[in-house]
Amino acid sequence: MSQNTVTVKLNGTQMESFSEMMEALGWKERQISNEYVEDSFSSPDGAVATLYSSGKLVLQGSIDFTQTIAYIKGGTENGQDIVPHIGVDEVGKGDYFGPLVVVACFVDEDFVEKISYLGFDDSKKFSDKKILDLYARVKDYPYYYPIVLYPKIYNDLTNEYGNLSILLAKQHTQCIETALEDLGKKDIECKKVVIDQFSSSKHRILDELGPLGKYVDIEQFHKGESDIAVAAASIIARGIFLEEFDRLRAKYDFNFPKGASNVIRSGIDFVRIYGAEKLRDVAKVSFKTTKKILKLV
């Protein structure tokens, strides 16, 4: 097995029992001179577990840490029972090339237990390779609901709404409505939705809610990935984005860059090969970058 790194967050109770747990698993304590490290242990297989004073636990090695984390965390998140709920997040709004992906993900205690073992966290903290690995492990989970807006559709809707926040609100609420409808059909109760807030106005989402969304508790806050359901939605959305990005590269045989910082040269080259009109099919042309590209072609 290749080298594996997993990061999980422990609560106070779990931190207090960490040493005892690791010794019970047969791990040996390591001496580390670092003021931010609470404890560090190594396994008979050569894996290393380092617990920081912040509560962050980092496990590194060529073994599967699923059972180790299950033992340490005891099958709960933050030491509390999980209230089943939906988390919603989007990926791609800051990328010039590629789609916008919005995902609503329903989590219950069983699913939280699984993804906690895997080390789910904010997708922005992980490499593309790590995201694809995590996504592959939950790809068959039946209770996430994605919307993929390919650039052409994204551009058409941006023109129609004239405001990115409105577009995002409509996609978020559509995901929520789809999720609640499906869960309802399957007699799965869900009374809460958590959203990584993308607009300064919380009413942006509330004004767009569908008939089912109006009857659940909607929570919005910045850095919403601190909620496990939002973190799951974030990673799934990023995994879908990366797969779609690779399809876009293959379709045009062109190495589109991610992000929005170093895209002008690629945009110029693309337009010279395929023409300015085709840029709408691969890029979010509402970005100011488009004017720069077309001016320099």
Image (spheres, rainbow, N blue to C red):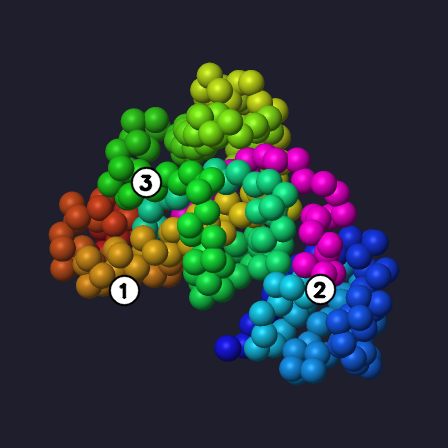
Residue at 78% from the left image edge and 53% from the top image edge: 11
Coordinates of residue 78 in the picture (x, y in percent)? 73, 48
Residue at 44% from the left image edge and 26% from the top image edge: 185
Q: Amino acid at mark 1?
A: Asn
Instruction: Tell me which label, 2 or 1, sits earlier in the chain.
Output: 2
Q: Nearer the viewer, mark 3 or mark 1?
A: 3
Coordinates of residue 285 in the picture (x, y in percent)? 29, 43
Q: Quadrant of the C terminus?
A: bottom left
Residue placed under numbered mark 1 in the picture = 255
Q: Which residues are magenta?
A: 70-95
Instruction: Tell me which label, 2 or 3, sits earlier in the chain.
Output: 2
Q: Nearer the viewer, mark 2 or mark 1?
A: 2
Does the magenta portion include 144? no
Dot 2 and dot 3 residues touching (CB under 8 Å): no
> Dot 1, how many residues are within 10 Å of its Cα: few (below 14), some (14-19), or many (20+)?
few
Q: Nearer the viewer, mark 2 or mark 3?
A: 2
In which quadrant of the rendered view does residue 17 lie?
A: bottom right
- Decide if residue 215 is in sight here: yes
The kind of secondary structure element at disc 2 is strand
Instruction: Tell me which label, 3 or 1, sits earlier in the chain.
Output: 3
Residue placed under numbered mark 2 in the picture = 57
Coordinates of residue 8 in the picture (x, y in percent)? 66, 59
Q: Amino acid at mark 2?
A: Leu
Count of all numbered marks drawn on residues in the image: 3
Residue placed under numbered mark 3 in the picture = 149
